[in-house]
Amino acid sequence: MTAPVRLLLVDDQALFREALATLLGVRDDVVVVGEAGDGEEAVRRAAELAPEVVLMDLRMPVLDGVAATRRLRAEQPEVRVIALTTFDDDEDVFAALRAGAVGYLLKDVSSARLVEAVLTAAAGGSVLEPSVAAKVVARVARLPADEPATRRAQPLVVPLSEREVDVLRLLADGRSNREIAGRLHLAEGTVKNHVTNVLGKLGARDRTQAALRARALDLL
């Protein structure tokens, strides 16, 4: 039996956090390791508790969810953030995805869908509310076909970070994790996490497929 996914709940409404914790407490495949009431506390608690997935509200005091997600991606790139919010307007959606969220769900999501999203994110996948996925597809469809690839937005649901693009380029050249770590002056474990994220965002099952898809999408 695999270990349950370690989950951090972040929301400025204590009652909502308590309800989520109670809901998820009956599951064997997810364990709530902690809670936070704002983005600043979320970053601090994530460093202490090492969650695999964070359910992140977006509109909070002190530090909002977008800024907190951006900091988590920079400081703990192995942590997978899912935005869980009441709002699905374009500004919130694309700000969260650009910050590094791997998922975007609304608070009226079913409990089964929420758990599925957490498990998918922990496994390296991405999850989007249908209305949000439609916005992403529409945004990509509006990109000018003749605009240079270097200036076009990445045609991915969740864009690659600059560091992930660096890793992808070396991965596509056939470099091992150890070689990539040496070239980019990173720990080998950090490179492994970046590779996992790259595969997940490209929907690739292995390094070869990731390189082929990246070239097809003009990411290299």
Image: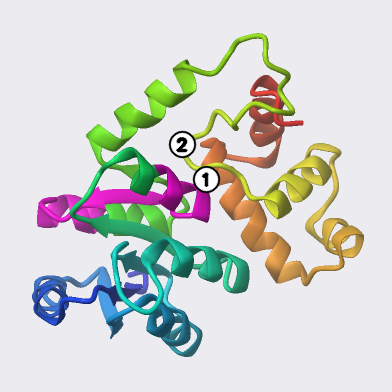
Front residue of this view, candidates 165 and 176: 165
Q: Which residue is mark 2?
A: 157
Image quadrant in which you'd find residue 209 = top right
Q: Quadrant of the C terminus?
A: top right
Which mark sits nearer the N-terminus, 1 or 2?
Answer: 2
Left or right of residue 90: residue 215: right
Relative horizontal placement of residue 9, taking residue 51 as reference (left or right)? left
Q: Residue at x 47, y 90 (%)?
A: 48
Q: Position of residue 92 (x, y in %)?
A: 35, 48
Question: Is 112 included in the stretch rendered in magenta?
Answer: yes
Q: Position of residue 4 (x, y in %)?
A: 32, 73
Q: Position of residue 119 (x, y in %)?
A: 32, 58
User: In the rendered image of this protein, does residue 124 appear above or below residue 81?
Assistant: above
Asked whether 21 or 162 is in front, the reply is 162
Mark whose residue sits in front, 1 or 2: 2
Q: Position of residue 104 (x, y in %)?
A: 32, 49
Name the kind of residue labelled 2 in the image. Val
**Which circle marks residue 200 in the picture?**
1
* Start-end of magenta stretch: 94-116
In 3D space, how far apart are the residues under numbered discs 1 and 2 (Cα atoms)?
A: 11 Å
Q: The N terminus appears in which quarter of the rendering?
A: bottom left
**Quick one: which residue is furthest to the top in this view?**
146
Residue at image coords 47%, 52%: 124
Residue 95, relative to residue 78: is it above or below? above
Q: How many dots with numbers? A: 2
Residues 60 and 215: in front is 60
